[in-house]
Image (cartoon, grey):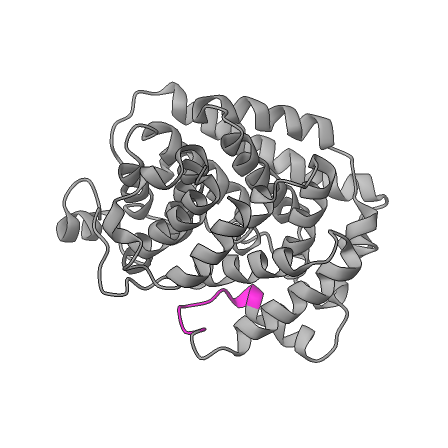
Amino acid sequence: MSTASGCLFGLAYGDALGKPTEFMTVAQIRARYGPDGPRELEGDPALVTDDTQMTLAVGKAVLDAPAPTADFLVRLLRDRFLEWAASPDNNRAPGMTCLRACGDLSLGVPWTRATVVGSKGCGANMRVAPVGLVPTYDLDTLAGVAQLQAAMTHGHPTGLAASELTAYTIRLLRDGAEPAAVPALLRARCHDQRTVYRGDWLVDLWEQAGVTTPGEFIARGWDECLAALDRLDLALSYPDDGQDACQVTGEGWIAEEALATALLCAIRHADDPVGALARGAATSGDSDSIACLAGAFLGAWLGMPAWPAGWRERIEYADQLTALGEAWD
């Protein structure tokens, strides 16, 4: 099976297609690329953004961990995030939340204080795909690692819940779930986990949020994800008009919207994976993050055959994507 590689390369392909369109209007995108959006990689190599760079950081930390515990992963994630922050390649309009948190981490501030507690930006979950690919993780471990990697920079409960749901989506699709079946499975997960605070991973993070209990803290995140899934269901109930995918599910700058809009693109174009990337890249919102998640979802479902054969040699970081994919394939 090549589903791990398909997921990681699909993420990078979507990121590369969405990179030039992230700050363009839909009208500008269509004027440049046509009504279907960008369907061809640009450049050799085709450059990606911080979405792929940070996905690689998470993937390397997860792969290097001797055991999937908070003790190991906090240190490894911190090291990889700081390596990314200091890299000369960190010049792709990185998110301010990640930069701010990494700045404090570099000064030795404990991660529960370095994180930006009010941020639920999509930086929390655009990098989480590797967590859903580790075959030895049970669902509790998947949830803990997904939430921890988010929480080290984005401390808002919705960023945590959306990251778990994103990793869970990867797991579901890799295990053979149909894309159209995923929203209902995510909804069930939201209800099941609504007041589950993973203190062995998140320690005292909840105390900074002005709430009285850990359960109250995390429930806010699950409730906001449920509201995003409501909007996804509403969007899917309409015939596809081919217009901006962000109209109902949101522009994707925040974590739950990135998940919902990427899922919308993946479900609408399950039979045309490149079309899913193009649809995500041709939006009014965070086009690279939406397209990269759509690519991760369909790649986890279909594997490398989902993508044009010639793209593998042209995408930036192909060697690192290959190494991670092979580790989990």
Q: Is residue 60 left or right of residue 280?
A: right
Q: Compare residues 136 and 103 and report the one nearer the observer.
A: 136
Residue at the extreme right: 212
Question: In which image quadrant can residue 79 be found?
Answer: bottom right
Q: How far across and how far down the image is residue 133, in percent?
A: 56, 43
Q: Compare residues 324 and 162 and report the one nearer the observer.
A: 324
User: Residue at position x 68%, y 49% from top?
Assistant: 145
Q: Is residue 177 above or below residue 162?
A: above
Q: How far across and how far down the image is residue 262, in percent?
A: 42, 39
Question: In which image quadrant can residue 112 be found?
Answer: bottom right
User: Residue at position x 56%, y 56% from top?
Assistant: 59
Main SS of the magenta part reads loop
Q: Is residue 110 above or below residue 250?
A: below
Is there any visible trace of residue 251 in the rendered image?
Answer: no
Q: Is residue 136 above or below residue 210?
A: above
Q: How far across and how far down the image is residue 227, in percent?
A: 56, 32
Q: How many marks?
A: 0
168 in the magenta segment: no
Instruction: Look at the image and tell me in which quarter the N terminus lies.
Output: top left
Instruction: State the extent of the magenta-drawn residues as a range.
Output: 90-98
Q: Is residue 55 above or below residue 159?
A: below
Is there any visible trace of residue 186 in the rendered image?
Answer: yes
Q: How far across and how far down the image is residue 320, in percent?
A: 45, 62
Q: Is residue 117 left or right of residue 50?
A: right
Q: Is residue 97 left or right of residue 197?
A: left
User: Residue at position x 32%, y 64% from top?
Assistant: 47
